[in-house]
Amino acid sequence: MKLNNKGFAVSTILYGILSLTIIILMLIFGMMKSSKDLNQDLVTNIEEDVNECVTSEVELEACYFGGGECDPSEYNSCIGKKDEDVKLANVAKIGDYVNYDAGTWTTTASTPSSTSAFTFGGYTAGTSRNNSSSCTSSSGYDGWRILSIEGDTVKLIHAGIPECMYVAFSSRYPNRINNYLNIITGSASGTIDSSLPSTPKDWSIYVNNNYATSAYLFNLEELNHWYSQVNNATMSYGETFDNDLIHIKGIYLLSDIDSWYSYYMLNYPIYSSVYTAVSGLYGIRPVVVLKEGIKTSGSITNTDGNKEWILVR
């Protein structure tokens, strides 16, 4: 009887230990399952957030490449708030592409010729002003690139030639230089040939009010300024150089002109100050001045494989 009582006591203790062990194991397994569920929820949330970011990135890029006016803040926080406090001037460099949108042409203008001197054309209604015109055999690239960064002010230059102008300079008609000056700069001190156009060009067609303040034609001073920054030198007549920011293999006019026989243009593959009366068709390259301190929400890789900064309104 005593032995049975002792055996019963031992058995009770063993069963108690076993039961406690089972309870502990169940608690451990329960905690592990709970932890697993929490981890799974965390992983799921992260995956959903990443997928949302990727989807928004893809949608945003599709918007830009589709020629739309895209505001990063319309997308989720991964896009709209990413680096939006970063000034473009602090992170970008000369030559970088920027997703600036100058809008679309509202009218069609055929390529000018000798019978339509001092007029512009080479574009079709509904096409983008960001694209290069086919009015010259080699019109450069599409889009906009950073020409200069001065403090918080960033200037963009068209990466190609969006339109062309036919100039008609001649020793017989020296006053025509004033037509050109009045058209390009809105100011001419001499007599204008009334038989040809002289109305100032409306450069504001290239201004997107969300991002820019003004626009004008690229000039010799800026060309030399750019060249001095890149090569620590000043351009000289007949000098050969090769850089696809300024040197787009297309002939285009600059706004600086001294007289009918001395006007400036960039002529591939040399920088030229032309001293003969050469009438003909030339491209133009507008420059836009961005709002001071304009910000960027980061960059994407555009369809040409180049880094392109996204502007914030």
Image: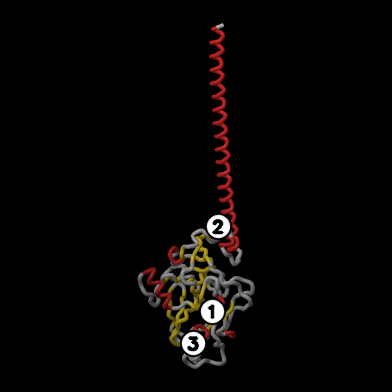
Occupied quadrant, residue 69: bottom right
Can residue 161 be seen here?
A: yes
Are dots 1 and 3 in contact, CB under 8 Å? no
Which sits earlier in the primary sequence, circle 3 or circle 2? Answer: 2
Whole-Å distance between the Cαs marked 3 and 2?
Answer: 48 Å
Specify the amino acid type for callout 1: Trp
Specify the amino acid type for callout 2: Ser
Where residue 39 appears, x then y in whole percent? 55, 41
Which sits earlier in the primary sequence, circle 1 or circle 3? Answer: 3
Q: Is residue 42 above or below residue 199?
A: above
Where residue 199 appears, x then y in whole percent? 55, 86
Residue matched to label 3: 187
In front of the other: label 3 or label 2?
Answer: 2
Residue matched to label 1: 203
Whole-Å distance between the Cαs marked 1 and 3?
Answer: 14 Å
On residue 77, the disc is 2
In the image, taking residue 13 as reference, residue 263 lies left or right, namely left
